[in-house]
Structure formats: C-alpha cells, structure tokens
Image (cartoon, rainbow, N blue to C red):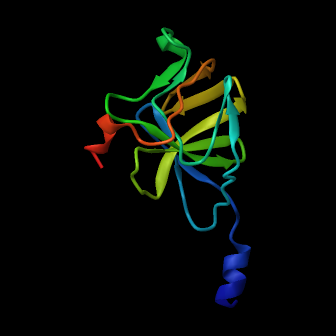
Amino acid sequence: MTSEQLVLSLPDKLETFYQGSARYAVLTEYVDIDHAPLSLGDSVISSGQFVQRLGRKNKSRATFEMQDDCYLRYVGKHGDFILFAVNDTLADYCYAFGYINATRLLVVGNGSAFDIILDSIDIYDDLPIDARKFN
C-alpha cells in the first residue's frame, strides 16, 4: 500500500475523550471541520468568534460557563459535535459539545451528562482584553 492509498483509506472520524466533566475532540488533519456560521440560541456564531457562557442566564444547571478570563473560541462543526478551543490557544484538541439543535446542546463528561438550553448568547468578534494576558 502506498502512502497516498493509506491517507485516502483513513476515516474522517472524530476521536473524543473525557476529562473530568467535559468531552474533548482530537483534531487531526484527517478530520473535516465545517467552518460555516452556526445558529446558537437567538444568534449566529462564526468560526473564530468567542463566547464565555452557553446556556440561560441565571440558570446554572443548564449552563456551561468558562472561568474568569477564559473564553470559548468557535472552531466549527463536525457531524453532531460543535467544537470550541480556549481563547487564542492552538492545540490539537478542543471542547466537543453535542449539537442537538440551535437551542439545545449536550454536555457529556466522564460519568455525567446534561443539556444546555440556549437563549441569548453574548458573542465577541475579538478576544476580550481580560483574557489576552493569558495567551
């Protein structure tokens, strides 16, 4: 088998793993990511934009919120997963949320799962200044 045949035979499968209460996806050159804008709640997010919270305001049970000075950067979508990196970091893995529809996501961790109900989402085009000191 030639190296070209080997590359063509690799599946476009997203590998995921759990750490704590979060699911992560391993990004490789073989994973095809859709970078098209995506409806989330009452907003549309584009690849490279940032959020700090996913879920309803004042409803911690159905919310995923980053700690202070950390933001989720939308990478794109693969199959039933939407992918987010942290701040401006470049890594070969990122957060993977199950995408049910524009108003509901699924967070699956190591032995836990909950859904996120999306309403209004604060989207930032640039990484807010408070997070830049950590990059």
**Along the line of sight, which residue is nearer the eye, 9 or 130?**
130
Q: Position of residue 34 (x, y in %)?
A: 69, 53
Would you place residue 57 above or below residue 25 in this image?
Answer: above
Q: Position of residue 120 (x, y in %)?
A: 60, 19
**The furthest residue to the top:** 58
**Along the line of sight, which residue is nearer the eye, 71 or 108?**
71
Location of the N terminus by quadrant is bottom right
Q: Residue at x 70, y 49 (%)?
A: 36
**Along the line of sight, which residue is nearer the eye, 48 or 14?**
48
- Drawn side of residue 42 relative to residue 88, left or right: right
- Drawn side of residue 36 relative to residue 59, left or right: right
**The furthest residue to the bottom:** 2
Q: Residue at x 73, y 74 (%)?
A: 9
**Along the line of sight, which residue is nearer the eye, 110 or 24?**
24
Would you place residue 30 above or below residue 45 in this image?
Answer: below
Would you place residue 96 above or below residue 120 in this image?
Answer: below
Q: Residue at x 69, y 62 (%)?
A: 12
Q: Position of residue 63 (x, y in %)?
A: 51, 19
Q: Position of residue 7 (x, y in %)?
A: 67, 78
- Drawn side of residue 116 relative to residue 80, left or right: left
- Drawn side of residue 84 relative to residue 43, left or right: left
Would you place residue 5 above or below residue 127 in this image?
Answer: below
The quadrant holding residue 20 is top left
**The furthest residue to the left:** 133
The quadrant holding residue 38 is top right
Disc count in the image?
Answer: 0
